[in-house]
Image (spheres, rainbow, N blue to C red):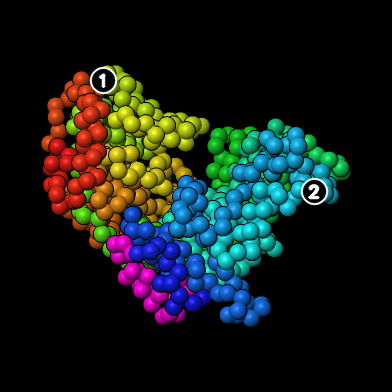
Amino acid sequence: MEPSRLFEEFPAPSYRGAQEQALADIRDAFEAGNDVVLVRAPTGSGKSLLARAVAGCGARPSEVGPEEPIGSYYTTPQVSQLDDVASDPLLEDLNIIRGKNNYSCILPGETDTPVNQAPCAREREFDCQVKHRCPYFSDRSIAANREIAAMTLAYFMQTAGSDVFGQRDVVVIDEAHGLGEWAEMYAAIELGPATIPPWEDVKPDVIDGLDDAAEYAEYLTTICDRGLDGLRGNAELTPEEVAKRDQLTKLRTDLNWFLEDYRDPESATTWVVDQHGDAGAPATIKPVNPERYLKHTVWDRGKKFLLLSATILSRDSFCAGVGLDPDRVGMVEVPHTFPLEHRPLFDVTQGKMTYEHRDETLPKIARILVRLMAKHSDEKGLVHCHSYAIQDQLETLLREHGVGERIRSHDREDRDGQLGAWQRSDEPTVFLSVKMEEALDLEGDLCRWQLLCKAPYPNTNDSRVARRLEDGQWGWYYRTALRTVIQACGRVVRAPDDYGHTYLGDSSLLELFDLARTDTPDWFRAQVEAMEQPELPPFSANAALSTGTTERRTRKTNQSTQQSADDHPLSDVWD
């Protein structure tokens, strides 16, 4: 890696905010001998441009010996983040590769077939005459041979050990705050009808602990071997048989990984198992500290690493969670350059939203939401519901209050479609969302206000969470929730001249800010300390539905884009 190239590799024609200083700090951190540099940079600070600059510092063939790794990887856990990179003209030299299921075969009669089920996957020794034009293999070849290959974290981990995507000099991971949790999710082994083709014939008895899980895993590996042996006898497979083969292959690999690690007395990984019911019910085998998994899939893939996020809250805790030695990890802090008055927090808390208090608190939040809709009668809003149960109850209450026509929502199957429709609409509707605290860019009039319904603590019914709390890892518990809150607050203020309200409905959020105070970035602590209770109009469904005229909305939009922050006090913009 050549950190001295950082400034010449920066892809934008000029710097904004604290980018120039951030580049200098990153350069100094690498030149100080750190193998890994963490960058804590707030939303809107241009992390992707910093990432591109570092990726451009990867070794070139002329600079190192023939056996030394060259080039860089750029990866992110968020598909939407990769889409943003693909559409950014400043990042056009990040050559993107996606999984096979994202590409369609180009053979006649197969154009509706994803590449992972195409004839090359179905027929033994199939000789594809158009492989050089196949969109997947073309993108893969380009990404493998260019200086910077970009991919999702899932694809990056899946290609560990491949001949195509071997070790490179530099690895850049954007939105890296959840790396440990993402690794736990990818390494989890789901055992049920969706992952085990002959499920009805091999359902487990009651799995009471890891010894039972290991015994069942051994049995399943035998089943996988038999199934794969049977499929190998076929010269050509149907699409259904291809899917079965891929399922069995992945399952066998995952089970062998678990068994090998579980039997290793020196392994740092702690495994837990959940069975979702009695005998015959599906089960999940999950790692709590997947350090070994990350070593193989991430840390062995590069020599130098840059990890960026707005919410790497504690260097030491982050390192412990992903298997890094803090002595080889540097930290760069990028200040927030957005005016504090453009990103205010407001306390509209109505009580606790824990399960035992929810029935009492949620109706109050519904009423306060109607008042917020009246205050922001001609502006789009977002509600972070935290769960589909809360979303469903809240939507029912709002419809009972007579404001249903201004509400939009989604379910698990149509979340992307409904979100896209809401974003494209000019109407001042309110979107009830679940798990959209991250990777959502709502700049400008796309959304001017949002409500957090519930403190986003991890689910204590998850065995991994329960195990950590049994071990006294309460700091991790509070940091995880705070991290999600900070991510959520960044959805509606995306640029220095952007502005947006964030309202807090759950009083547990106020407790969280106290409990996680020592891990709170200075710039977010300033938001918390400036928080106040807003003046809201009285409860009125008619006022909540009175969206004003199109002319008024157009005039307001023009004013907000033409005036600078100094030209319009906060009260003039929002009241």
**Residue 41 in view, yes or no:** yes
Residue 116 covered by magenta stretch = no
Residue 450 location, quadrant: top left
Q: Using the image, determine if residue 188 lies above or below residue 380.
A: below
- Residue 424 vertical placement versus 16 (above, below): above
The crowding category of the residue bearing disc 2, from other C-alpha atoms within 10 Å (few below 14, some 14 to 19, many at least 20), is few
Q: Which label sits on residue 129?
A: 2
Q: Residue, x 21% and y 30% (percent of image)?
A: 552
Secondary structure category for the residue under label 2: loop
Point 70% across, 48% down: residue: 134
The x, y position of residue 179, in whole percent, is: 47, 57
Q: Secondary structure at mark 1?
A: loop
Residue 232 is situated, as x and y percent measured from the top left of the image, at 83, 45
Of the two numbered discs 2 and 1 in the rendering, the one whose residue sits closer to the viewer: 2
Q: Where is mark 1, residue-wise? A: 401
* Location of residue 148 (image quadrant): bottom right
Q: Provide residue 258's location: percent of width, then percent of height.
A: 63, 54
Q: Residue at x 56, y 71 (%)?
A: 169
Q: Is residue 99 left or right of residue 183?
A: right
Lateral position of residue 567 relative to residue 230, left or right? left
Please state which of residues 196 and 148 is positioned toward the viewer in this rendering.
148
Residue type pointed to by label 2? Gln
Q: Assign the C terminus to one quadrant of the image.
A: top left
Q: How far, Cα to Cα, is label 2 from label 1?
A: 63 Å
Numbered circle sitting on residue 285: none
Mark 2 or mark 1: which comes first in sequence?
2
User: Is residue 32 found inside the magenta-colored segment of the image?
Assistant: yes
Q: Marks 2 and 1: CB-CB under 8 Å?
A: no
Residue 271 can be seen in this image: no
Magenta range: 15-36
Q: Taking 390 as reference, is 373 left or right?
A: left
Amino acid under disc 1: His
